[in-house]
Amino acid sequence: MRERPDDLIDEPVVVLKAAEHLGVIVADFGPLAARYIKGDAVPLPRLAEALGTTERAAGSRLTHYAYLDG
């Protein structure tokens, strides 16, 4: 999808609306998923691999979701 962004921009309002919906989903479920990951003590290397990122970035993402959780 990232290789062909122009294919998605025929209807920019639709793309923006979809991005808004995805943002709401992330805000609702990201903190919940982070709590489960911490509760199950998922090792950071495993999380990083699942997310396709570095351990540092995965840890940062968990911290971000914990912050969203209040």
Image (cartoon, helix red, strand yellow):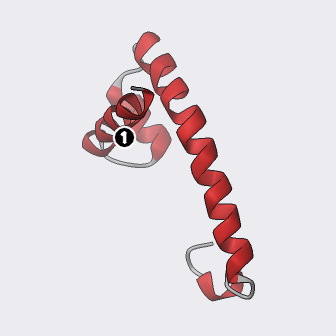
Snapshot quadrant of residue 60 = top left
Instruction: Relative to 46, say whether 10 is above or below.
Output: below
Q: Could you say where residue 25 lies in the image, as x and y percent from the top left?
A: 63, 43
Q: Amino acid at mark 1?
A: Arg
Instruction: Relative to 6, say whether 42 is above or below.
Output: above
Snapshot quadrant of residue 19 = bottom right
**Which one is in front, 7 or 54?**
7
Q: Residue at x 30, y 45 (%)?
A: 57
Instruction: Relative to 2, say whether 40 is above or below.
Output: above
Q: Residue at x 61, y 46 (%)?
A: 24
Determine which residue is flagged by label 1: 61
Q: Could you say where residue 10 lies in the image, as x and y percent from the top left?
A: 73, 88
**Which one is in front, 60 or 50?**
60
Judge from the rendering whether residue 15 lies leftward or rightward of residue 26; answer left or right.
right
Q: Farthest residue in the left direction? A: 56
Judge from the rendering whether residue 69 lies leftward or rightward of residue 26; answer left or right.
left
Snapshot quadrant of residue 21 = bottom right
Q: Could you say where residue 13 lies in the image, as x and y percent from the top left?
A: 70, 77
Q: Secondary structure at mark 1?
A: helix
Image quarter of the N terminus: bottom right
Q: Could you say where residue 39 lies in the image, as x and y percent from the top left?
A: 44, 11
Q: Residue at x 49, y 39 (%)?
A: 50
Q: Is residue 24 visible?
A: yes
